Amino acid sequence: MTTADTPSAPFTELVNLASRLLGAGVVATNEDTFADAENLLVAKPAEFRPHTFGHKGQIMDGWESKRRRGVSADQPHPTDQDHDWAIVRLGVGGVIRGLIVDTAHFTGNYPESASVEAASVPGHPSPEELQDAEWTVIVPRTPLQGDTAHEFAVQDDTRYTHVRLNIFPDGGVARLRVHGEVLPDPRELDGLTLDLAAQEYGGVAEAASDRYFSSPHNLNAPGRASVMGEGWETRRRRDKANDWVQIALAGGGEVLAAEVDTTHFVANAPGWADLVGFDASTGQDPADGEWFEILPRTRLQPDTRHRFRLDVGRPVTHVRINVYPDGGLARLRLTGRLTEAGRAALALRWFNAVPAAEAAAALTAAGLTGEEAAALAAARPLADPAAATAAVAGLQPADGPDGEHSARRRSALWRLLGV
């Protein structure tokens, strides 16, 4: 399959965690003499301009390492294990569901095979610290073909922050895409007002009535749209219905304000829009439950950022924007803050997904002893707040008459997970 084709794997509908718009970057590589490793993350498809030469040869739009050689005249070829690598910091930590390793335009200089590893390293680690991290293979070494977008589904529920692409023995890769589910560290959101719909916090455009001209995922993408094609646009309706996009928020929250942005949509903005909400924290399914009004049907202007203060008065986990009758939007922003229950649900998902050592370290920082933290981390996954509370109650040593251990443990659990 070439980059001219549309990727078919379902994971490509998920956020590209390696997007530079989200903050991804190439932090280290052992070799990129022919073409910079940073090209791996360029958003647009790779291009090729024949007979365009620089000081090091044909200019390639991708990452390309020099040709490997053996150790001596008697052994002129590289070994089977010789390889080049590039480490990518994901823009946001998340659960990886699939990758695309694209060798577009590399036909006589693509790697024989490749593998991908992942690691979870909190904070802002240096390249040297990343080399010493614990890496997990998420895509085993697999043969590659030239000028092909290779799709690899990943079956791993761990939250990762970095990936390492290994190519054997050398060669070129045009683009790397890492699709998955954003899973932020809840401690970084405590006390903040944020865009609950934003991709960088875990918002997902999970359904839409129409995506003929452009994707609904553009609605909650980072930054502002620079052209109309970076928004969501529907085909022209010839019936009496309307178009819509449904967004699952980063977590259950209190929505305080909305921005409905029609920037660049001059002759094809919707005439009106409304917002409806849903609270799935009660266990109901948005497909079957009752939605409630957030913003009544309101007139829109072309090429305009419309801002609305909201008074919803109840938690919201999902929002649907209805546009009448059709047209396009650049962005939808939903400013608010997580509710106590929404923060707890997010924290539990995060806690279940991080590696055991990272979970134990977070528990220790919250106030548990090392032994208690290790025991609670080993008890994962914790299905719900009740399971977390029960796991803490079962920690040893058992409490004395004064309840000192129980009080400290409950306080630590509340501090980290909000339960």
Image: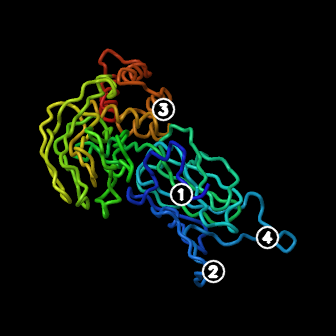
Dots 4, 2 in contact, CB < 8 A: no
According to the image, label 4 marks what residue? 71
Question: Picture coordinates of residue 90 (x, y %)?
Answer: 45, 54
Q: How many labels does the image show?
A: 4
Dots 1, 4 in contact, CB < 8 A: no
The residue positioned 85% from the left and 74% from the top of the image is 73
The residue positioned 42% from the left and 56% from the top of the image is 124
State which tag comes first along the sequence, 1 or 2: 2
Amino acid of disc 1? Leu
Image quadrant in which the N terminus is located: bottom right
Dots 3, 4 in contact, CB < 8 A: no
Amino acid of disc 4? Val
| Mark 4 nearby-residue class (10 Å; few <14, some 14–19, many ≥20) | few
As measured in the structure, the alpha-carbon distance from the residue carrying label 4 to the one carrying label 2 is: 25 Å
Q: Which residue lies furthest to the right in this view?
A: 74
Question: Picture coordinates of residue 36 (x, y %)?
Answer: 54, 71
State which tag comes first along the sequence, 3 or 4: 4
| Mark 3 nearby-residue class (10 Å; few <14, some 14–19, many ≥20) | some
Using the image, tell me which numbered label, if any, was put on residue 374.
Answer: 3
Image quadrant in which the C terminus is located: top left
Using the image, tell me which numbered label, if any, was put on residue 57.
Answer: 2
As measured in the structure, the alpha-carbon distance from the residue carrying label 3 to the one carrying label 1 is: 35 Å
According to the image, label 1 marks what residue? 176
Amino acid of disc 2? Gly
Relative to 74, 59 lies left or right: left
Relative depth, front residue between 333 and 411: 333
